[in-house]
Image (cartoon, helix red, strand yellow):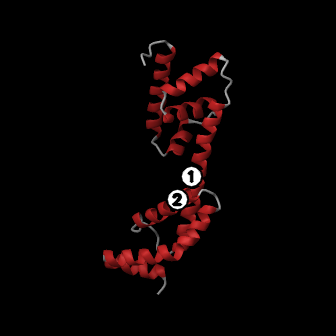
Amino acid sequence: MNLERKLVSALNSKDKTKIESVFRQIYDSYFKLVYFCVSNYINVHEDIEDIVADVFVSFFNHLDSINIDGSIKYYLTTTAKNKAINFVKKKKEVILEDNVLNSMKYESKPNLLLLSLNEKLTKEERYIIVSHVLYDYTLNEIATELNENLNTIKSKYRRTIQKLKLILGGKDNE
């Protein structure tokens, strides 16, 4: 019996032991393939292992909603690819933000101001402001990227702007 049929049978029986046993077989059968898919995008062994683990945890947690009639192999490789790409995107954003801050000339007043604000804003606040103001991302794009609700990002942006006004107005007591 192939793994798809075994998994459907185990899920239908609602027997946790059977489900875990089939999941273990799926893990053993596809671990190397998923690892290979992720390693096409990422070079650091620890990061690859984290993403591979995340792929299988996601698969296990969504067994009820996955279309098992399709290919488990296809599901796992597609999920691995998407998680690896998302990881690379997030890594590039962090590097980009760090590069912007590191490439500033320390002599100019605006850059000194930005560097001092770097210490007073959270990483998320800096990301929202830099993405929106410097890189012209819409708040909707930022919400999608951060996996947040648009209204939440709007509120965080508004609060950060208010915080900046206080800091720039000399009313910051930190």
Asked if residue 61 is positioned above or below residue 22 in the image, the reply reads above
The residue located at (58%, 57%) in the rendering is 84
Instruction: Mark 1 or mark 2: name the one nearer the start of the chain.
Output: 2
Residue 20 visible somewhere in the drawing: yes
Q: Secondary structure at mark 1?
A: helix
- List the single residue furthest toward the bottom: 1
Q: How many numbered discs, if any?
A: 2
Q: Which amino acid type corresponds to the residue marked 2 in the rendered image?
A: Ile
The residue located at (52%, 61%) in the rendering is 49
Percent of width and height locating residue 15: 31, 77
Q: Which amino acid type corresponds to the residue marked 1 in the rendered image?
A: Phe
Residue labelled with disc 2: 51
Residues at discs 1 and 2 in contact (Cβ within 8 Å): yes
Query: Which of the 4 quarters of the picture holds residue 152?
Result: top left
Residue labelled with disc 1: 87
Task: Give whichever of 37, 45 is nearer the camera.
Answer: 45
- List the single residue furthest toward the top: 170
Percent of width and height locating residue 128: 53, 34
Q: Secondary structure at mark 2?
A: helix
